[in-house]
Amino acid sequence: MNSWVDLNIIAIVLMNFMMLSSSRIRICIRVVAIQGILIGLMPLLAGVHSTTYASLVSLSISIALKGIVFPYLLLRALQKADIRKEVEPIGGYPLSLLMGVILFLVSCWLSSRLIYAKPLFSNLVVPVSFATFFTGALIIVSRTKAITQVLGYLMMENGIYLFGSALLGGQSLLVELAILLDIFVAVFVMGIAIFHISREFDHIDTQNLTELKDWVPSKQE
Amino acid sequence: MYAKVTQLILIFLISPFLFGVINRIKAFFAGRKGIPLLQTYYDIFKLLRKGAVYSKTTTWIFIAGPIISLSALVCACAFIPFAGHRAFFSFEGDIVLFIYLLGLARFFTVLAALDTGSSFEGMGASREVQFAVFAEPALFLSLAALVRITGTMSLSDIFANTTINTLTTLDPAILLVIGALFIIFLTENSRIPVDDPNTHLELTMIHEVMVLDHGGIDFAYILYGVAVKFWILGTLLMSIIFRTNSGIVFFDYAVFIFGMIVLAVAVGIVESIMARLRLFKVPNLLIVALALSVLALTLTMRI
């Protein structure tokens, strides 16, 4: 077993935990970007299908998007909306970190139950991609700021990409590119949306959006 | 047999010295001269010559607490390998006994603190136990990961098998265990990211507040127990990272003791450059240790 691949996978899991425990959005954005780069580099480290021209193009596109373009867009949105810290997530940081550990165990169990083709590298890839996917979902559910939810979305995409690159190899090229395009548009649109929300409401806390209802004239004093 | 007795005597003699090293490093960073390297020994001898004052609210538990804690820790010493050589006692499964001896020491420190009837000490006891809830499973799981890697349940065998060779192959599980053990090491010895051994600020103390009412001989026991515990948990860490297996026994010993001093220097540096965490952030750090050890264990289960 290639130990660099293993180390890389461990780094990806640690990024999940870091994402769950960090309260600074700036750090969260970088963590997701670095995770994207690490996942992009994975096939190169493992030495699979790195020879085909097409897969190299797909790799470099995905690394460029996730490592440079997305963080740039999000950091710009962050600057425009003038936010620095995430508010305490639902349930607090220790609980969400503990949930992350439990989700990791669940994904280990899940991947031992599923029947799939042998991954192109390291057996750990499948549980880790599930764990990344679930962690992204957990972040979408438990965080209250729109920008962190976008990060959760990106993290889910990271998980899917890792799964695809491990099990499908180069064949998934077209699908991956299509997904990347979707994500790109989503992040782009969310960047603008976050800016508008924050200009309109002075904050981007989605918790308050649940209270939207028909406008009722306030009581006359 | 002589070698094993020598090991124990060395542990008992050297362990308070490490605190002197830590203090020197901190003093160096702060630009001070620092207290003598042997200050912990002076303190212990000074306290041993003094009598103790007991409050009327305390019972025999208060007197028994430090004695039982120290003896549990001394027993735990007999199970940890020294410089990769076999420990004084070892049998299959002594790892569980070892962890429970540490637990016993903690339990009686907490009990003695509660016995004083002071709400202040109760606060410290509650904090100590609250953090132990996270630190102990992490210790258990990281040792379990080592058990899975080496395939043996005795501390002596585990550390005889996890050599530097496993490190050079960059076994990720071992690296994770080292990370988890370092956090546990700092927590259990009430070192800076978790607790500050020097401060006597009421709101944030953990270990110091529990032993505040002990005096004289009892406090000497506690002080010595803390030093021994530092050595025990440090050994778990350094036996993985830093030791040699040359044929010459005393060369190995010297290298290992040097390794422990390096660890003390590392702790001193951490204490000098880091601020302690806010109290409610500590569980976060401990859950990180837990996560690392869970990860290490799963890695070893799958491969």
Image (cartoon, helix red, strand yellow):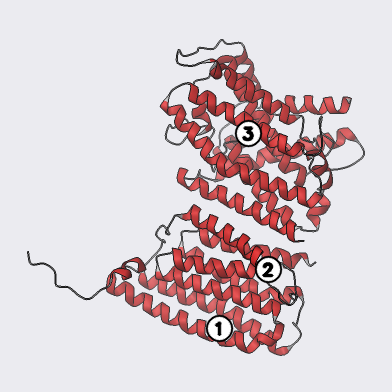
- Residue at 75% x, 28% y is B11
- Camera-near label (1 vs 3) is 3
Q: Could you tell me which secondary element the residue under label 1 belongs to?
A: helix
Label 3 crowding class (10 Å Cα cut-off): few <14, some 14-19, many 20+? Answer: some
Residue A113 - label:
2
Q: Residue at (30%, 74%) from the top-left corner? A: A199
**Residue B13 visible, this angle:** yes
Element marked by disc 2: helix
Q: x and y percent of residue A95 in the render?
A: 49, 54
Q: Position of residue B295 (x, y in %)?
A: 66, 56
Which of B182 and A92 lies nearest the eye of the viewer? A92
Quarter the N terminus of chain A occupies: bottom right
Q: Disc 3 vs disc 2: which is toward the camera?
A: 2
Place residue A51 in its image quadrant.
bottom right
Q: Where is residue B302, by image quadrant?
A: bottom right
Residue at 7% x, 67% y is: A220
The answer to whether B296 appears left or right of B111 in the picture is right
Which residue is under mark 3?
B103
Residue type of the residue flagged with mark 1: Leu
Q: Would residue B169 be found to the left or right of residue B128 on screen? A: right
A34 versus B202 height, above or below: below
With B79 as the anchor, is B53 left or right in this view?
Answer: left
Q: Which amino acid, by three-letter code, is at mark 3? A: Gly
A148, B198: nearer the viewer: A148
Across and down, in percent, residue A37 comes to 62, 73
Mark 2 or 1, closer to the camera? 2
